[in-house]
Amino acid sequence: MSSDPFWKNAGLWRYFVKEHFLLVPLVRDQATARTLLDEGDRQMRGVKRLWMDGVLDAAITHVGNSDMHDRYLAIKEAESRAR
């Protein structure tokens, strides 16, 4: 995909990002799970309206208790206030 910001804000991109987090509980090894989490986290940076299409909910549910989890909760709260 293009690095054009349009793609990062398009609805399909949010689904792409969300799938990274939804796959985490389906993989059998921790290395693959960590790779999915890291890539999902990388891909979601700069994406707006993460509350749409359940991206943040999927991320919050599947990252466990970590700095990522706290950051996603803060993003969700900020986006909720902005709406």
Image: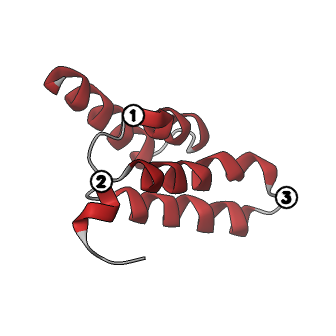
Task: Residue at 60%, 41% (x, y): give it.
Answer: 62
Residue 12 point in image, percent of width and height:
47, 53
Count of all numbered marks drawn on residues in the image = 3
Residue at the image point whose x is 17% and y is 21% from the top:
81
- Residue type pointed to by label 3: Arg
Give how far across and how far down residue 75 sits, in percent.
28, 37
Q: Nearer the viewer, mark 2 or mark 3?
A: 2
Q: Which residue is mark 2?
A: 9
Q: Nearer the viewer, residue 26 or 70?
A: 26
Q: Which mark is residue 41?
A: none
Q: Kindly report the distance in space between the C-alpha atoms of the residues bearing marks 1 and 2.
A: 11 Å
- To which residue does mark 3 refer? 28
Please tell me how crowded label 2 is: few (under 14), some (14-19), or many (20+) other residues with Cα within 10 Å.
Answer: some
Residue type at numbered disc 1: Met
Q: Secondary structure at mark 1?
A: helix
Residue 65, how many percent across, how many down?
A: 52, 38
| Residue where numbered disc 1 is placed | 52
